Image: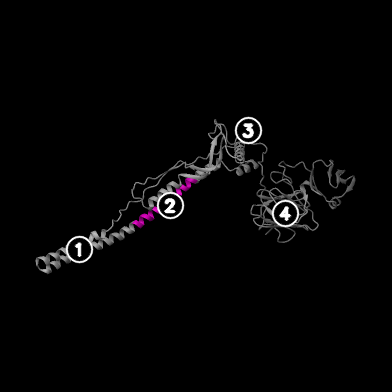
Amino acid sequence: MSTQLNKTMTQQYPAVPNFDDQIVPRDAVQYDVFSYGPTFEHVEITDPKQTITLDQGKLTQIDGKWQLDGTDQTVKQLHDQGIIVISHDQLQLLTTTLPVNDCLIGDVPSAGIRYQTEATVYLVRRTDGDFDFYVTQKKAPVYLNDRRLTSEQGQLHRYDRLVVDGLLLVVEKQQFKLASFDQRDISLNAGVVREEAFQPIYPVDFPKFHRSPRIMLTPPTDKISLNQPESVGEETKNSLVRAILPPLTMVAASLATSVLSGGNPLMSVGMGGASLVTGGLTASAYFTNKKESRKKHQNRTADYEAYLINQTAKLAKLAEQQRHAATYHYPTTDSIAEMIATYNSRLYEKTTNNADFLNFSLGTGYVPASYKVDFSANDSKQDDLVKRAQSLAADYQTLAHMPITTTLNGTTLGLVGRPTITNEAIQALYLQLAAFHSYRDV
């Protein structure tokens, strides 16, 4: 699916981006002049009588006619000399999504960004978010960061500017910025890129800055108790022997008494048979109880394992809450640098009234849990379930890779170590203090 785009400059910044990186509206601009020379130039004309100097010569407008070094020139004649002059409202500017994969720019049906040009640019998305590009220039002018491209390949990093025969492509943080300044339309293949609203890098009221209400995340202080597994009586050794030994002893005693006394052997057989029946019933009851005991042990294990899984989920949630609170208030240096680059509203958020004023992170390590895990093993003989509960309690007593914090508020701090390491630590300290504390407070 292809979308035809032919939009003139009826809106101003911040509704749409500017051609350059300026962040003020351009409603006073009357003409845009572009020059293809050893370098690519863009000049905005607010007063037609002003004279601008280009590689090709001095350009001015007199009585509604353009002159180059004092010689009258038509717009087409200027174009043939590598100078493009358009009224500001003819400049087409739009922003698109970044392609997930590769993207082709050119005048071919398969192009993600279709534009009438003899050049072809193939963008290859890299794993780090940048792009490799391959250009077939033919005779079309191609510039990278305002310098004429001398090779057929290169890399596009964030905020790099690629000019291809009247088309500007800028890799923004989360968007492509496209501009057509040679009165040629842009078509987008929605399966590759699609148009979306402009996302300004800076706040609309920049450079004015206002402290936003601070969000205070507190670590959890819940108490999680791990219950003991259900007690189950242990089967003693030789219990079967002790159960059937009395009936067998009675049989043996009856036989011995009959033989020694010369009594009626049938009486001995009867008494012995009764004892054997008693022994059989005893053995049967033993095996039945053993089966029930085994099942009870299995149910006990399954129930307690399910209980431990549920408690583990609760502990994991509490640990994540504590981690989120800590990393939110003490982000990494890369995250702080990103906040500064985008003028994040959290800058200067710590005030003298905050308990963590002048607090900062020294790095990461192990910290005790803010919540409490309670488990006491009362049994002298601990089975595997008790050991698993003990291990679970021990695992969540401390958290790894957490910010280790200290303060400069009312204290003196000294760092001892190798210069390369201590210098990095001091730089990280300054970065945190400068980002989260106003220069009026420190």
Which callout, 4 or 3, points at the residue further toward the start of the chain? 4
Q: Tag 4 or tag 1, which sits nearer the N-term?
A: 4
How packed mark 3 is, by other alpha carbons closer than 10 Å (few <14, some 14-19, many 20 or more), is few
Point out the stretch of residues depicted in magenta. Answer: 297-319
Residue sticking out furthest to the right: 71
Q: Quadrant of the C terminus?
A: top right
Q: Are marks 1 and 4 in contact (CB under 8 Å)?
A: no
| Mark 1 or mark 3, whichever is nearer to me | 1
Q: SS of the residue at dot 4?
A: strand
Q: Nearer the viewer, mark 2 or mark 1?
A: 1
Classify 284 as above or below 397: below
Marker disc for residue 248? 1
Comparing 194 with 341, the one in front is 341
Say whether disc 2 or disc 3 marks the residue closer to the N-terminus.
Answer: 2
Q: Nearer the viewer, mark 2 or mark 4?
A: 4
134 and 197: which one is in front?
Answer: 134
> Label 3 sits on what residue type?
Tyr
- What distance separates the C-alpha of mark 1 from that of mark 4? 96 Å
Q: Nearer the viewer, mark 1 or mark 4?
A: 1
Q: Quadrant of the N terminus?
A: bottom right
Is residue 309 in the magenta section?
yes
Q: CA distance from mark 1 to mark 3?
A: 96 Å
Question: Is 314 within the magenta?
Answer: yes
Q: CA distance from mark 4 to mark 3?
A: 42 Å
Tag 3, which secondary structure?
loop
Residue type at the position of mark 1: Leu
Q: CA distance from mark 2 to mark 1?
A: 49 Å
